[in-house]
C-alpha cells in the first residue's frame, strides 16, 4: 500500500494507473476511519482495479465555531485499517497542499444543498464540493464510493458530477450501524456514555416513522414527522435540528409520503455533538 501526501505524486500515480488501462476508485474521507468507511472500500473492490482512499480534514466544510480543531485524527490507526482492506493508495495531503496561500476558488451546487443541513451549516456543502472537485482532478477516479448516511451530501455530489461533466460513476453504500442502531460516525467518539445511550434514539425515531408508513399505511407527512418527534422528545439530551421527509433524489420536502421515493432525515445535537441519520421509505 502506497501513502502519498503531495498532489504531484498523487497525480503521477493516477496517470500511471490509467496508462496501464486500469480503473480507479475513490473513497474520500476525513480520517478516523470506522467500518462505514471501510465498507466503501469493499464496495469498490468489485468495480475497479485500483482503490484510492483520501484522508483530509477539510477546513472549508467547517463553519465558524464548529469542530475543525477538535475533529478526531489518528493517521497511524487509519493506515493500519487501510492495510487490512484492499486499499492500494492512501492520499493524505496537508492543508497547505490543498489550499495554498492565495487560494480563492470554490465550487458550489446551489439547489440540493440549500435546505436541511445547508440551513444551519450554510458554507458546508460548498466546502465539500470544492474539495471533492479538487480530489477528482488529482486522483482521476472512474468510480466514487459514498455512504448513504450523508444522504444530502450524496445528492449534492451527484449533481456536481453531472453538471460539471466529471466522467465518474457514483456507488452508494448502505448505512453501517452499531449494534443498537446508531449510524457509525467519526463524531460518535465525542459522545459521553449517557449521550451515547440517548443517541440511539435517532435511529429508533426513524424506525417509528417507517413503521406507521408501512404498517398503518400513513402517507401524511406531518403525522409521520410527529411520530418521529415523539420518540426524539423522550430524550432530555437531544435538541432536534430538523426532522424532514424529502424526495431522496432531490432533497425537496414531500407533501405526501411516496413509497420507493421518500426518505426521513433527522439531525440533532447532544450537547455540542451534532449527529444525522436517515431511512428510506
Image (cartoon, rainbow, N blue to C red):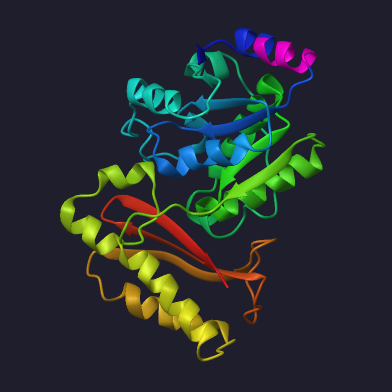
**Is residue 32 among the parts visible in the rendering?**
yes
**Is residue 105 among the parts visible in the rendering?**
no
Q: Nearer the viewer, residue 211 or 152?
A: 211
Placement of 87 over or under 258, stated as above or below: above
Residue 100: image x %, image y %? 56, 14
Q: Residue at position x 53%, y 54% from top?
A: 174
Q: Nearer the viewer, residue 45 or 102?
A: 45
Placement of 274 over or under 217, stated as above or below: above
Give the farthest residue toward the right: 165
Residue 15: image x %, image y %? 73, 13
Q: Nearer the viewer, residue 241 or 248?
A: 248
Q: Is residue 56 left or right of residue 26?
A: left
Q: Residue at position x 33%, y 77% from top?
A: 231
Residue 136: image x %, image y %? 68, 28
Q: Residue at position x 65%, y 31% from top?
A: 25
Task: Identify the magenta region.
Answer: 13-20
Q: Is residue 19 magenta?
A: yes
Amino acid at each position: 500500500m502506497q501513502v502519498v501526501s503531495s498532489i504531484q505524486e498523487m497525480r503521477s500515480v493516477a496517470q500511471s494507473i490509467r496508462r496501464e488501462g486500469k480503473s480507479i476508485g475513490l473513497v474520500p474521507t476525513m480520517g478516523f476511519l470506522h467500518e462505514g468507511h471501510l465498507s466503501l472500500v469493499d464496495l469498490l473492490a468489485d468495480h475497479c482495479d485500483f482503490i484510492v482512499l483520501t484522508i483530509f480534514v477539510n477546513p472549508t466544510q467547517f463553519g465558524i465555531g464548529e469542530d475543525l480543531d477538535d475533529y478526531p485524527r489518528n493517521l497511524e490507526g487509519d493506515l493500519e485499517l487501510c492495510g487490512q482492506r484492499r486499499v492500494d493508495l492512501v492520499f493524505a495531503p496537508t492543508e497547505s497542499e490543498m489550499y495554498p496561500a492565495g487560494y480563492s476558488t470554490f465550487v458550489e451546487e446551489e439547489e440540493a444543498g440549500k435546505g436541511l443541513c445547508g440551513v444551519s451549516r450554510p458554507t458546508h456543502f460548498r466546502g465539500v464540493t470544492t474539495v471533492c472537485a479538487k480530489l477528482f482532478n488529482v486522483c482521476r477516479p472512474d468510480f466514487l464510493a459514498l455512504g448513504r448516511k450523508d444522504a444530502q451530501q450524496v445528492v449534492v455530489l451527484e449533481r456536481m458530477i453531472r453538471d460539471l461533466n466529471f466522467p465518474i460513476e457514483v456507488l452508494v453504500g448502505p448505512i453501517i450501524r452499531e449494534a443498537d442502531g446508531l449510524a457509525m460516525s467519526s463524531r460518535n467518539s465525542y459522545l459521553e456514555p449517557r449521550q451515547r445511550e440517548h443517541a440511539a434514539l435517532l435511529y429508533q425515531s426513524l424506525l417509528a416513522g417507517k413503521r406507521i408508513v408501512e404498517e398503518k399505511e400513513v402517507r401524511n407527512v406531518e403525522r409521520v414527522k410527529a411520530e418521529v418527534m415523539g420518540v426524539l422528545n423522550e430524550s432530555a439530551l437531544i435538541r432536534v435540528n430538523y426532522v424532514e421527509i424529502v424526495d431522496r433524489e432531490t432533497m425537496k420536502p414531500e407533501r405526501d409520503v411516496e413509497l420507493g421515493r421518500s426518505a426521513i432525515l433527522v439531525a440533532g445535537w447532544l450537547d455540542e455533538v451534532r449527529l444525522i441519520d436517515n431511512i428510506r421509505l
